[in-house]
Amino acid sequence: MQTTNPGHSDARYLKSDQVMTMLGYSNRSSFWQSVKRSGIPYVRVNARRCLFDQRQLSAWLLRRSVGTVDRDLRDCA
């Protein structure tokens, strides 16, 4: 992917197989069902290629986090 914007980096985007691995999916079909059902943000480049913005994906994961470390530790004690 070439870009003319010097502040824009391709390293900021992940391919679907990278996100599948990161989220623990091995089945492409169930991964895409989850993407659409859960609202995981992605960019459709063309009919066959989608990319995931790392910052948007990180923000999505943070919104889905449950509790805090302190609370989780108290619950385990």
Image: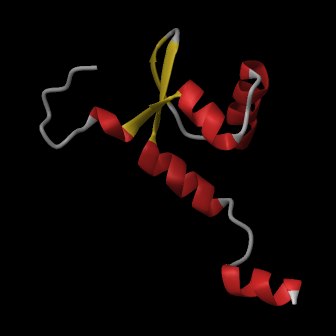
- In the rendered image, residue 44, in percent from the top left (x then y), is placed at 48, 22
Q: What residue appears at the point 70 percent right and 87 percent down from the top-left corner? A: 70
- In the rendered image, residue 55, in percent from the top left (x then y), is placed at 43, 50
Quadrant location of the N terminus in the rendered image: top left
> Which of the pair 25/49 is nearer the observer?
25
**Farthest residue toward the top?**
47
- Is residue 39 visible in this depiction of the protein? no
Q: Is residue 68 above or below residue 2?
A: below
Quadrant location of the C terminus in the rendered image: bottom right
Q: What residue appears at the point 21 percent right and 20 percent down from the top-left corner? A: 2
Q: Is residue 63 above or below residue 35?
A: below
Q: Is residue 39 above or below residue 67?
A: above
Q: What residue appears at the point 74 percent right and 69 percent down from the top-left corner? A: 66
Q: Residue 41: which quarter of the image?
A: top right
- In the rendered image, residue 61, in percent from the top left (x then y), is placed at 61, 55
The colour scheme is: secondary structure
- In the rendered image, residue 42, in percent from the top left (x then y), is placed at 52, 33
Q: Residue 53: which quarter of the image?
A: top left
Horizontally, residue 76 falls left or right of residue 29, namely right
> Which of the pair 1/63 is nearer the observer?
1
**Farthest residue toward the front?**
77
Q: What residue appears at the point 40 percent right and 35 percent down from the top-left corner? A: 13
- Is residue 46 visible in this depiction of the protein? yes
Q: Residue 65: which quarter of the image?
A: bottom right
Q: Is residue 70 above or below residue 36?
A: below
Q: How many marks?
A: 0
